[in-house]
Image (spheres, rainbow, N blue to C red):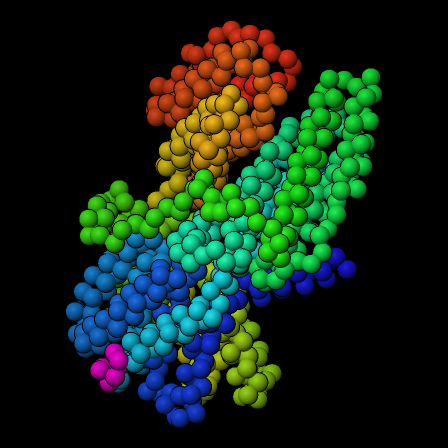
Amino acid sequence: MQIRRDYVQEIQRFTTSHYWNSGVRITTGIMVPMLIMIHQDWLASGIPFLFGALFVSLTDSPGPIHHRRNGMLAAIAFNTAVVLVTSVLYSYPVLLLAEIILFTFFFAMLGIYGARAGAVGTLALVIMLIYMSPLRQDHNMSMSVLLTAGGGLWYGFLSLMLYRLQPYRLVDQALGEHLILIAGYVRARAAFYKNDTDVKVVFDRVMKEQVEVLKAQAQIRELLFKTRQLVGDASPKSRSIMMIFLESLDLFEESMYSYQDYKSLHDNIDPDLLNRFYREVLQVVAEFEHIGLAVQAGTAIKKIPSFKTSLDELEAVLQHRLTNPSLTSLQQQSLRALRKSNRNLTSIVDRLTKIILYTRQEAYDPDRFPDQEIEKPIDSKPLTYSLFKENLTIRSNTFRFAIRLTVALLLGYLVSAWFSISHAYWVMLTTLTILKPVYHLARRRNVQRVTGTLAGIVTASVLLFLIPNNTVLLIIMVLSMLMAYSLLRLNYFGFVIFLTVYVVITFHFLNPHEFTKLIGERLIDTLIGSVIAAVVARFIFPVWQHHQIETVMKKTLLANTTYFLSAWNALRDPAHTRAYNATRNEAIVALTNLSDNFQQMLAEPISSKQSSQVHQFVIANHSLISRISSLTAKDIAHAEVAPWINQIVDTLQQSAAQLDVPDNKKSTTDTNHHELPKLPELHPISIIHGLARDIRSIVN
């Protein structure tokens, strides 16, 4: 029964998400004009219109409406210009080669202006390669240019019209996804309390979930604070959206407070008691996910769940066990830690209740709307030539990627010419869709592209063999298109499978007699493009994370040092709370970036001796942030811990400085260590001091 419920919930999560909405929008934008063309027998001459709509729609990623509008206008302009130039140069191979080199480098460099600009550049290259196909040579150039622009304008109109009809839909979906991801993070942390758990494995999962939560937060900040309607509108809907977001930020940060020494918990607490708490967390997470789905669907939640009885009972059990005089100090400490986690879970439940009230628009806190303490989103990079010029250096990762992509497409063109491959554009198209600025993404996409293409061809072949009815095949083709574009930004492997099924059935309709030959050629072209992408990604100006990881480690240490000082200042004077909130966010983001970079480093082909060291460093810094977050004024006597504070800061700063020192010159001693006044056993500050010294040992 649980499996069925989870399965249904996953379907509901997908079909209410912005991924599905994007798939429906793109499919509608292509299929409506296509059906009209088929009915009027215009399809053969109207293909450029469909291309124009498709390659603008794929740049229409979630974001503020003015960013989406400007991105689509840029895509229309670039796509139209590329079609014109490619059509003019089609009969001149030398000039066409020059176009490949210049356009590939230029459009790849657009990535310096952000992900949306990068997508515009990539899709302009895709349409360039398609118009190099022999199938395009008989088309009227002027008509192709006009139809390409017309298709882009049609999709742009459709997208903007749908936004006007549902202006809050996208932010609802983003908020719901954010809540579901936080629930996944809490679920991952809950595994720490499970019997026979592998703490290191659970920790890695926690960090991966944290990366996804931070990415979702960045997207929502952009949607909220760069959309004037949401910030300035005082309507109940806008207020409820803002309040849900603010509450979700607090909820996520609060879920980090309960970090404990999990090995000590398992060693000193009855397993049945830990499992009882684990089950409580899972019940809260299930409700958490239900709330996220409701927010994503834009519906109000009618029933407020009650966990008070079970949480109060657990609190009473923990309090009773603490009165046992035979407990050791470690057992008492572990029970207090679990009681603190239980109270933290109670606080999370209270925040979920507030979110439920906000979905009904029944609660509102005027002091928090809009919240001036919320970190504003990072502004998009200005579209200036100076920024472009500054990145024309081998030190720029975007420049290195542009060179890499240019070499790859040039190789694809030359290899296709040398072996007289009739569809050179498909070889280059495969390479273009595989290569990414980061090596591990390129490698993963390469595997997914090849295996997904094979799986898609087999699936489509079976369908064509079993289903002779063209109407049924047309329905399957449309559904495959819908699923492909819904999965585009969610699951690349699934996207490739459904896209291949869609393309194969399309080939079957367009040219049933040459169908088998075309599929065989496409498969060979895909394999050639895959090999080229693999070789270029590995050997042409690769960017290895293990060369950059120490820089990221240093940023994390400096952010944690600042965070610790802000926490100390806030404990002494509540007036520093605003600075504390800002530095806490910066520390969490820095740690998330470190974890993300570490995962990329593990995927690199060059085995690095740093892997174990960096893993220990990530764990230690996660523990440090959690310990700092859980500090409270009642734990601290300011006078007696002041010397400890200074030494913690000195140790962290010394650790950051060590990362700039060559390995053969690093000091193995802590020059700032000196005798400190005694603190009670397991005092929060002494634990943080121990973590700081552990970090110092790791970086040596």
Front-most of 197 and 689? 689
Front-most of 415 and 458? 458
* Magenta region, main secondary structure: helix
- Residue closest to the far bottom: 40
The relative height of residue 464 versus residue 116 in the rendered view (above or below) is below
Instruction: Answer with left or right where residue 377 lies relative to residue 272.
Output: left
How many numbered marks, from 0 up?
Answer: 0
Q: Quadrant of the N terminus?
A: bottom right
Q: Position of residue 232 (x, y in %)?
A: 42, 54
Q: Give the quadrant of residue 191.
A: top right
Q: Position of residue 112 (x, y in %)?
A: 29, 51
Range drawn in magenta: 140-146
Instruction: Answer with left or right where residue 422 lies relative to residue 361.
Output: left
In this view of the protein, can residue 538 be seen by the observer? Answer: no
Instruction: Answer with left or right where residue 363 lies relative to residue 125.
Output: right
Q: Quadrant of the C terminus?
A: top left
- Magenta stretch: residue 663 in it? no
Residue shown at 76% from the left, 42% from the top: 308
Front-most of 85 and 101? 85
In this view of the protein, can residue 604 be seen by the observer? Answer: yes
Residue shown at 32% from the left, 87% from the top: 45
Q: Position of residue 247 (x, y in %)?
A: 56, 45
Residue shown at 33% from the left, 75% from the top: 153
Residue shown at 64% from the left, 13% from the top: 680
Q: Position of residue 320 (x, y in %)?
A: 82, 27
The relative height of residue 513 versus residue 700 in the rendered view (above or below) is below
Front-most of 395 and 563? 563
